[in-house]
Image (cartoon, grey):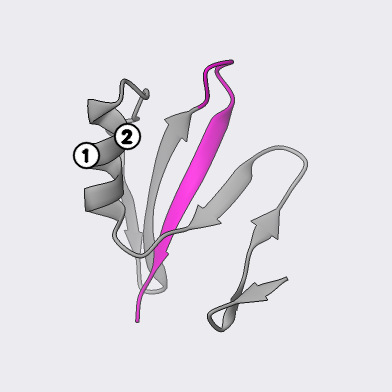
Amino acid sequence: MFEDGGPTVWSTFMINYRVDDLDALLETLRAEGVWVDEHREDYDYGRFAWIADPEGNRIELWQPLK
């Protein structure tokens, strides 16, 4: 599936969501009580961060570079 020129990726071991503003989203999620991993990774193709759903499943957030 393509949205705004790029794919949304589903894998069997982790969900990956593309986001527009990683830092703002993480602040909002943290304020709502969502567990946010403090580790970040920055690459030439985007930035990554991780959160967990209420059952403890990790979710990857990816902000592609524009």
Identify the residue under disc 2.
29
Magenta stretch: includes residue 56: yes
Q: Badge 2 local density, few (<14 within 10 Å), some, or many (20+)? A: some
Identify the residue under disc 1.
27
Give how far apart the Cα atoms at labels 2 and 1 are.
6 Å
Give the residue displayed 65% in from the left and 40% down from the top: 14
For the residue marked with disc 2, what is the amino acid?
A: Leu
Residue span colored magenta = 53-66
User: Label 1's element?
Assistant: helix
Residue 38 coordinates in the image, percent (x, y): 27, 32
The foreground one among 32 and 18 is: 32
State the image quarter where residue 8 is shown: bottom right
Give the residue displayed 41% in from the left and 60% down from the top: 19
- In the displayed structure, 51 sits above or below 66; it is above
For the residue marked with disc 1, what is the amino acid?
A: Glu
The foreground one among 33 and 38 is: 33
